Image: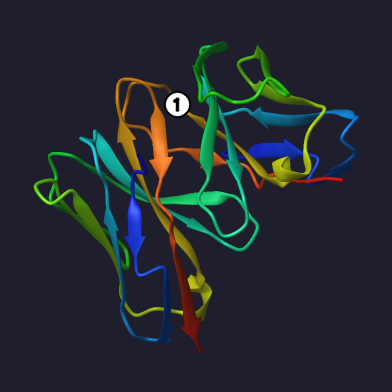
């Protein structure tokens, strides 16, 4: 199994809603990532988890709250988002950090904030 | 600072032709990677070249790296309509797995 699975594929939420994005991998990877991608732009790194601990937070606003319950799962909790947060949210994993590893990406969650 | 700026940003070629995309980066890297993204989908890893390598091949892909010029190029030979996608270079720097993507090249291969 070389898949990274993201749910939901599409999400529409209001600015007062609370929602969560989910990501799962069963490749035994110990590093997991959240990226945000606006239309016609490159992915921008948000968070990196290494061995279930948050290792990188790229100064992301607190309305985005990541969680890594175990080595296979990664969540992104959303609360009080703004319309400008509408984007494709991509989860990725790699075998480890600190090594020259390639990233495996999920198909993303297309988020619209109304 | 933005790592990885691709050139050209858009490229349209006929099927069977070769496509060359260039990438420049600003800081020292551990490796440089190339990814492909079909519209609105996740990215797929194509090839990784380490900082001590100069050229690498994988099927129809050829990647070069010039660390003195902080640049890389991706060549796709004998292009196919199915190669139509956006291509991103991504640089890995630092001790942690901080992979930063360039702005990308949108490739269209016309059948």
**Residue at x 68%, y 22% (from the top left corner):** A73
Q: In the figure, is residue A19 to the left or right of B4?
A: right
Task: Tell me the crowding category of disc 1: few under 14, some 14 to 19, or many 20 or more residues within 10 angstroms, Cα based.
Answer: some
Q: In the figure, is residue B6 to the left or right of A51?
A: left
**Residue at x 46%, y 38% (from the top left corner):** A103
Number of marks drawn: 1
Q: Position of residue B38 (x, y in %)?
A: 58, 62
Q: Position of residue A102 (x, y in %)?
A: 40, 38
Q: Which image quadrant is residue B48 in?
A: top left
Q: Which image quadrant is residue A83 in?
A: top right
Residue under pointer 1: A95
Q: Position of residue A85 (x, y in %)?
A: 71, 40
Q: Chain of mark 1?
A: A
Query: Of all residues shown, which one is farthest toward the left?
Result: B68
**Residue at x 31%, y 20% (from the top left corner):** B95
In the picture, which quadrant includes the N terminus of chain B? top left
Q: Position of residue B4 (x, y in %)?
A: 33, 49
């Amino acid at each position: 199994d070389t898949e990274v699975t993201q749910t939901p594929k599409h999400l529409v939420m209001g600015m007062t809603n609370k929602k969560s994005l989910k990501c799962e991998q069963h490749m035994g990877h110990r590093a997991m990532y959240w990226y945000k991608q606006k239309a016609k732009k490159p992915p921008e790194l948000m968070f990196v988890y290494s061995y279930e601990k948050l290792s990188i937070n790229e100064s992301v606003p607190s309305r985005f709250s990541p969680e890594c319950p175990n080595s296979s799962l990664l969540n992104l909790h959303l609360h009080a988002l703004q319309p400008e947060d509408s984007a494709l949210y991509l989860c990725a994993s790699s075998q480890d950090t600190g090594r020259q590893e390639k990233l495996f990406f999920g198909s993303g969650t297309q988020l619209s904030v109304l | 600072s933005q790592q990885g700026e691709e050139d050209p940003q858009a490229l349209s070629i006929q099927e069977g032709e070769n496509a060359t995309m260039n990438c420049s980066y600003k800081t020292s890297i551990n490796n440089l990677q190339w990814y492909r993204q079909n519209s609105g989908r996740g990215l797929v890893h194509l090839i990784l070249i380490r900082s001590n390598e100069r050229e690498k091949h994988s099927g129809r892909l050829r990647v070069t790296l010039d660390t003195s010029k902080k640049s890389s190029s991706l060549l796709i030979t004998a292009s196919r309509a199915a190669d139509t996608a956006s291509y991103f270079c991504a640089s890995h720097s630092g001790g942690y797995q901080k992979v930063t993507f360039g702005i990308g090249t949108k490739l269209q291969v016309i059948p």
